[in-house]
Amino acid sequence: MRLSPSHDVPGNTTTALPPHFLPDISPRPTKIKPMPETASPQPDHAPTKGDKKAAPPKPATTKPDDDVVGKAYDGRIMRRLAGYLAPYKLQTGVSAAAILLKAFTDIAGPFLLAVTIDTYLAPEAGKQHWLTHFLSRTPLTGVTEIALLYLAALSITFGLEFVQTYLMQWTGQKIMFDLRSQIFRHIQRMHIAFFDRNPVGRLVTRVTSDVDALNDMFTSGVLAIFEDICSLSFIIVVMLSMSWPLALLTISVIPGIAYATHLFRKHVRDSYRRQRAATAKINSFTQEYVSGMSVVQLFNREKRAFRDFSAVNLENKEAWTDAIFAYALYYPVVEFLASIAIALVIWRGGIAVLGATQHTWLSHHLYVTASGASAYSLFGNIVTLGTLIAFIRYAQRFFYPIQDLSDKFNILQAAMAAAERIFKLIDTVPDIPAPAKIIPGDHSGRIEFRNVWFTYQQLTTDQEAALQQIRRENASSQIRHSERSAAESKNPEAAHLTSTAQTLSTSNPNTQQPTTNNSPADHPLLRDIEWILRGVSFTIEPDHTAAIVGHTGAGKTTITALMMRFYDVQSGTVLVDGVDVREQDVHALRLRFGIVLQDSFLFTGTIAKNIRLGTESITDEQVERAAEEVNVADYIRSLPEGFNTPVIERGATLSTGQKQLISFARALAHRPGILILDEATSSVDTETELRVESALARMITGRTSVLIAHRLSTVQRADTILVMHKGQLREQGSHQQLLAHRGLYYKLYQLQYKDQELAALTATGSPATA
């Protein structure tokens, strides 16, 4: 199984597993604004030595999460996202009001310019703006008043822009904080099998870039679209009121812009998908090769690795090149069409200003020239020089929101895809369900496996149904067995015969307890499953030490993972402290355990923090006492800062042996009721192993202990030894019993000590001792 520290969750580290432990103003979009990149799914962590994990089943042919493009708008997802805005509805409402007012003040500039020209610079007979009645008749004074009004409008616009930007950026950061906290809490509650199926890079992407995409939507997406729509609406109303024929000329190019936008979105949509796939490959490739750089350099694979990286990098470059080409083509097309519209306005509006009367269009409208002569013009309302200049400014502003909306479409599309991926993660239900009624254990430290069958494979619906049927049949068999036992208790002679048969059966360490349960391996639908454990049954009594030995892939580490309920068994029962682990509170259950893994994991912080691991109830004195008991205190005190010596990521500055000793101190500091040592001394030198062994006797005293080791020298003092082979418990007994039986354990022992103790064993004919 995988109990790799790369899970980065407390359940996988060397600790008594405290459940409360936690490891320690975006600008407006530019013209070329690619969709937020999705970090790659990085290669999953390596399997732990000692377990053979079944190959995962082939997934159904579905689109990977990182390839989801998403709709520009999804009402279901948007309603769910609106729930994150609810706590900040006041700030959102103020921002929306500021946007509405700002859109109104934005149109003041061209209007004030028209008033200035038509009233003071180039006055027209018969044309007066409503604002003229409130201005001075003196040109110099009137121009000054208009300038002050313009300055006031700009100041109000600045203030509204500040309020809107600050509040929405603040709200966006609050939402990001809430969402990331929710995702991280959910990830912590997920079962270990979830991390086996989901690469670390994918989960990191959900917490980082996907949340950033939603932040862009809240700060630069939804409300910005609202601002663009308000600006367009006000501009259209003003243009229609000034000259509806000129307004129609301005918007006549909209169909061309809409078609160009459609082609642009279609092309960029495919480019974004290729970008995500290429970026994922780059990140995955880089993570894998950087992690294994020592092997790359050892075998002189630098050139080959660079060629492979260049191929992946080329895919990314080509995808970006296509996107850049689309942006480089789209924006000039929009600007060209906008320029055509403005040119038409200048052409026809200029003719009207010059007093041309020979052109007609749709209907004739009275036009009054500066001299007062009447004529018919195609432009209806009175077109003055000021009106024409203001109209050109409005036409220019009219196309800015249209261009901006294409960028907002990309932001919305990225946000919808990111939200879909995030909600898919949040909606994932843990495979380790909480019990309907919690039954606490008796804290005795007793561990029992009853006919346990387990596989890492994901079973189909039919296979799950078959297992349900087997469980029901086995439950009925147990009820009949209980009834028979009750009947035998009334018949002492029959009970004596049954007890004698059980004694004869269990006296042979080469056999397991016989069972009348149906075997999942016999069912047609379950024969092809690669079972990691096959009908395993044993009992570890309180305060006893049990050792689990066997070849690599025999299922040793899997047994300890099932004790802590990192996984649920497919068939059978695992009892800890006299209660089925599925009926206990998982946090309380794991608090009972302390575990030291072969590959010790240290977090960034100090040595003391790594020993305490977030459990504030552990005092400094207890930290030092734990280090003393595992013979590592002298080394820690010799460091410049002692127990406050900084530890960088994964303890890279410490040797393997030093990290292992700190892991022993961590486990001991939490005073667990059950101690698990999984190949805890396999990576240390002889001197360190001797120091650990001298502390091991103190660690296992007064608690149930489970040792997993390939070195048989570390398990000889165990009260009972479980010999696993191909997922089955083949032998069980003490060291001397198993040697005397000359079975599988004897062969393992012979491979390691055939030149040492076995010579004396053969000469004396007596069982070997520890």
Image (cartoon, rainbow, N blue to C red):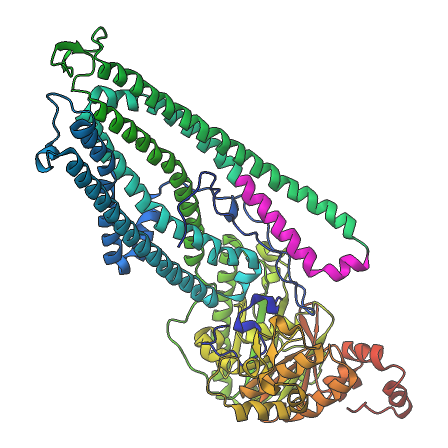
Residue 195 to residue 693: above or below:
above
- Which of the pair 559/274 is nearer the observer? 274
Question: Magenta stretch: residue 588 in it?
Answer: no
**Image: 54 above or below 502:** above
Q: Quadrant of residue 601?
A: bottom right
The image shows residue 144 at horizontal and vertical percentages of 19, 40
Inspect the magenta stretch and tell me whether residue 292 lies in it: yes
Measured as percent of width and height from the top left, residue 40 is found at 57, 51
Quadrant placement of the C terminus: bottom right
Q: What residue occupies the far left of the structure in this picture?
A: 133
Residue 538 in view in this figure:
no
Look at the magenta stretch and give its main secondary structure.
helix
Who is closer to the viewer here, 291 or 577? 291
Q: Quadrant of residue 169?
A: bottom left
Q: Is residue 453 visible?
A: yes
Decide if residue 344 is on the left or right side of residue 7: left
- Between residue 763 and residue 595, name the one nearer to us: 595
- Left or right: 536 in relation to 35: right
x 26%, y 26%: residue = 389
Along the line of sight, which residue is nearer the eye, 396 or 638?
A: 396
Residue at image position (29%, 27%) is 392
Horizontal side of 269 relative to 520 (left or right) equals left
Q: Residue furthest top?
A: 358
x and y percent of residue 298 in the render? 81, 60
Quadrant in the picture for the N terminus: bottom right
Q: Which residues are magenta?
A: 273-299
Position above or below: 69 against 464: above
